[in-house]
Amino acid sequence: MAVSPKQVVVVGGGIAGLATALALQERAAEAGFPLACTLIEAESEWGGKVVTHRVGELIIEAGPDSFLSQKPWALELCGKLGLSGQLINTNEFQKKTFVFSRGRLRELPEGLVVIMPTKLGPLFRSGLLSWSGIARMALDLVIPARRGAGDESLASFFRRRLGHEAFERLVEPLMAGIYAGDAEQMSLRATFPRFLDIEQQHGSLIRGMLAGRKLTRPAARLGSPNRTMFVTLQNGLGEMVQALVGRIAGAGATLMPARQVVAIRARCDRPGVRTYDVVLENGSAVSAEAVVLATPAFVSAELVRPLSPASARLLDTIPYVSTATLSLAYDAGALGSSVGGFGFVVPRTEGRDLIAATWTSLKWAHRAPPRQALIRCYVGGVGREAILKADDETLVRRVRAELRSMAGIAAEPAYVEVNRWERGMPQYTLGHLDRLEEIKVSLRNYKGLYLTGAAYRGVGIPDCIRDGSETAAEVIRHLASRQ
């Protein structure tokens, strides 16, 4: 007798939802039972914030422009999708990054390992820190490790270890900018637990980073093709989305773009066993034995509120901030001498509109023709969202004024593109991991209902892929238990 396929609905077609759907298909095949997967996305396009635009010979990323190679999950997915040959490293020349500090661009020290410089001479010469600030950093070697299991903010941790000046001028623009967040509120355990581990194991960030550097040297020589810290795809990250959608559809999934999920209803078939009806905006419903919500936390909150008000309240406590990226193309000969290296970051203490700027066509190959230069600017984030109230024209004018002031770029751009991400970046504030545990407990009566995505265990592309894969494994275990 034929076995009826297990029905699973994934709500949300961003990178996390797509990765979940693919992993569900793979794991169901390994487990040996048929699966019917339906993927529903409110927008007409797949990929969420992973969006690549081609404008003539320009390749413009509207959202993320790369991913970390140190986290293997995106590289592994590219291998599965046949995209490994399309991966490119950052350019070999001009590997410099700058910080706008005290009125000018200052080069980050050579040998910088995340935030810890392994060569002191370049740090002295950079002018980023005063002599007293550098001396305070060195006290990290003698300051004892903090004891206790309580959460700590990024700001508190790095001020304690390295001092106020190093935090303000070096750490904050590099690290808080990843989340467009405020380091005073960000949870160390949820965002950069590696530094907490280093402190506990080595008693000092400096000793720990130097020890880690020595350990990774032999591995790098013996490993697979060397990758720079950040990698991307030659024709843009949209290639990953296209390949994922093609693979998922080819394996038999039902894809439903431009469809809004308005409610989820639960039916109890027998004690402890539920079936879910995923209700669409036109009143139709898709029934499933498991549902994965790969949507922003505030969207998931509204969908689970009728089922578990406690879960919804907890999901509502995960804050989001808005950001925007502005891509500007210039005649390559019209830019000044300050345009070199990969770009610059701006400390919050400078009080500027701009968070960071990337010299995209210098950082990556194939982003612009030789006669043009492509620049990408970032605005918004915690405490800096007021600029986003301006219309596009005003936003561009203010960003161009920042580029003129900081990098001497006075030329008229040949092309400008603004991409806004309203409530696009979740914030892992103090207590974030404890909240996730509470959410899990609050949903325990709704077996077969899962949450995944950037709101929970990592905002980057590799983290979303990993989380989607792990969620798929949970779904398959649940479905297997129902057989």
Image (cartoon, rainbow, N blue to C red):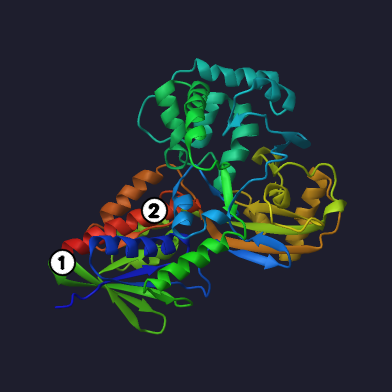
Q: Is residue 470 visible?
A: yes
The local secondary structure at tag 2 comes to: helix
Q: Measuring from the top left, give residue 254's x and y in whole percent.
A: 38, 76
Three-letter amino acid code at the position of disc 2: Asp
Query: First in sequence: mark 2 or mark 1?
Result: 2
Q: What residue is drawn where x is 64% and y is 22%?
A: 119
For label 2, the crowd category at 10 Å Cα-Cα, with few meaning under 14, some 14 to 19 and many 20 or more, is many
In the image, is 332 to the left or to the right of 191?
right
For label 1, the crowd category at 10 Å Cα-Cα, with few meaning under 14, some 14 to 19 and many 20 or more, is few
Is residue 354 shown above or below 195? below
Label 2 vs label 1, nearer the camera: 1
Q: What residue is drawn where x is 42% and y is 63%?
A: 17
Nearer the observer, 358 or 199: 358
Residue found farthest to the top: 142
Please give the residue where the numbered disc 1 appears in the rendered image. Answer: 483
In the image, is 161 to the left or to the right of 465?
right
Quarter of the image where one finds residue 447: bottom left
Please give the residue where the numbered disc 2 appears in the rendered image. Answer: 467
Is residue 38 shown above or below 175? below
Q: Measuring from the top left, give residue 351's x and y in whole percent.
A: 70, 43
Is residue 133 shown above or below 465? above
Q: What residue is drawn where x is 46% and y is 60%?
A: 81
Quarter of the image where one finds residue 419: bottom right
Q: Quadrant of the C terminus?
A: bottom left
Nearer the observer, 448 or 463: 463
Q: Is residue 446 visible?
A: no
